[in-house]
Amino acid sequence: MRIRKSPVLTILFWMLLAYFMLPLVWLLVNSTKSNEELFTTFGLAFPNTFAFFDNVAQLATYQDGIFFRWFGNTILYAVVGAGGAALIAAMGGYALAKFDFFGKRGVVASILGATAVPGTALAVPTYMLFTQWGLINTEAAVILPALASPFGLFLMMVYAQDAVPESMIEAARIDGAREWRIFFTIAFRLMVPGFVTVLLFQLVATWNNYFLPLIVLNESDKFPLTVGLSLWNKLANAGGVSVVQPLYPLVITGSLLAVLPLIVAFIFLQRYWQSGIAAGGVKQ
Amino acid sequence: MTAPTALVDVAASTRRRRPSAKLRASRIAYAFLLPFIVVFTLTIVVPLGYALVISFFKKQLIGGTVFVGIDNYVRALGDTLLHDGVLRVLLFFVVQVPIMLLIAVLAALAIDSGRLAGSRIVRIGLFLPYAVPAVVAALMWGYIFGGRFGLAGQVFGFFGVPAPDFLGPGLMLGSVGNIVTWSFVGYNMLIFYAALRSIPEEVYEAAAIDGAGEFRKAWSIKLPALRPALTLALIFSVIGSLQLFNEPSILQALRPSVITTNYTPNLYAYSLSFMGGQTNYAAAIAVLLGGLTVVIAYVVQLGVARRDRFV
């Protein structure tokens, strides 16, 4: 049976979609403008002179190209943080799903409780502890908190329950395989789709993180993109300060470059985030 | 003679072996869980405990850090600057969250109904903002709403009308709400959509036999099926609203006179500890805020669960 499309519904939601795309289109259009045309042309009209590559070139040279240093930092934090978090969650989720052990209920309860702990409530005490531990202004200060993902662990537990058959683990044990080997050669392979989902969501969380790096880093060469762009935005808006380099085009073009990788990743990895949301949202 | 003995032996040995098998399983399981337990302890448990401990102390000019009992909490309860922020995020929660969830539910229902042309593109498009950092989202919308080269102002100017001051004291909270809604509608929509997809086809067939129309189906089948997902979304939204920081922090650079240092409780705690040197008091605020979040999340869950009982 084919359902007839509703024109009213379609127009309504395509208008909503247009509103949602508006800021991204605006960002794309304005990344092609020089500082002058940013102020003189209409927001959604392309400029007379196409300045996108000029803006990128300025990003590469302004303050010795610190923008691309921030870009590299973000990649480092996101890849190590998200990769580590997903692996740690996969190992823990496998243990929770496939072993009957002492204290299991307590572990599960405290992890579920921790998903309700607001991350930002931890920021101030984390800062103070990291000061004592000598971690302030190190890569570890950003990466370490990114490694703990209670939600990721929960998702991997739910995933492993269905994806890894007990009989397969038993058969491997009878063949004399060691537990680590069983996990890495059998269980983990079956858990890969769930692993990629957690990886993707942690990648977004780490890539977009702002509050934590803002407080645990105080030298600009360690900044991720979010903190760096926010700093430039502050400078651009600080009236009265005569900045030789107009910063608005850099903030706008930099923002575009900062969002592109994740948008591309999301479009190409649709299967994974959709199944992840289904598992996390429905099977609670 | 031999067979019964063997049976008894097996039974006895399994009974004896069971605790040791569980012991062995525990050793392996904890080995797998160890990395998680380490990072979990270092970055969640210890900071939480630490916040609790230091919230009972105070740094003084004379005598260094001293134990002051619940002084910081008493101070917080009487701190009008904090009250301002808390009331603001509560107002934000009461207005922004229903709007966001309503749009998300309607979008999920529209996509699920099959009557929306190009629903795949709508679904991906509405979700994409989730991948955009809050910092960039606030920058884009802030520039669009701002006075320097703002698109909103240009559009209003085109019609010869002066644009309302979107970043002024009256509309700022609404502008923040717009940014947060933009960022999270798609994520919530996908949670709801997944819940709708999990409704078995037979339920719809039975409803069709009973002569139920589209609206009746949406009201009696789809909305009840959304309740667990809605509870989850509400709880995440409570956490998100009360912890509001990124968006106002970015917009503060655009309009410092409107986004004051106590605009949200989190901004207040941040400025207290990083600009005011009052870390102990800030820790007390963080603890109170965390407690309030848990309480509201719990109440939300109770409310929804109670309604579920009528179904």
Image: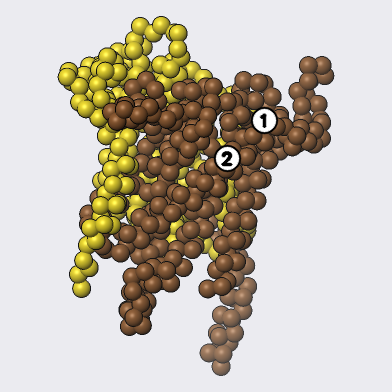
Chain colours: A yellow, B brown
Q: Is residue A44 left or right of residue B68?
A: left
Whichever of callouts 2 and 1 sits on the residue coming sooner in the sequence is: 1
Q: How many marks?
A: 2
* Chain containing mark 2: B
Residue A65, image x, y percentages = 33, 15
Question: What amino acid is found at the position of numbered circle 2 in the picture?
Answer: Val
Kindly tell me whether residue A176 is visible in this rendering.
Answer: no
Q: Residue at (37%, 20%) from the top-left corner?
A: B148
Q: Which residue corresponds to the image point at 21% horizontal and 19% vertical from the top-left?
A: A51
Residue A72 place in picture, x, y as percent = 35, 26
Q: Is residue B62 visible?
A: yes
Q: Disc 1 marks which residue?
A: B81
Callout 1 environment at 10 Å: few (<14), some (14 to 19), or many (20+)? some
Q: Is residue B263 above or below residue B123?
A: above
Chain to which mark 1 belongs: B
Mark 2 — residue?
Answer: B89
Three-letter code for the amino acid on which mark 1 is drawn:
Leu
Local packing at callout 2 (Cα closer than 10 Å; few below 14, some 14-19, many 20+) is: many
Mark-to-mark CA distance, 2 and 1: 13 Å
Q: Which mark is residue A223?
A: none
- The image position of residue A170, as x and y in percent, is 43, 67
Image: B76 above or below A248: below
- Callout 1: SS: helix
Query: Label 2's element?
Result: helix
Tell me: B141 left or right of B71: left
Q: Quadrant of residue B220?
A: bottom left
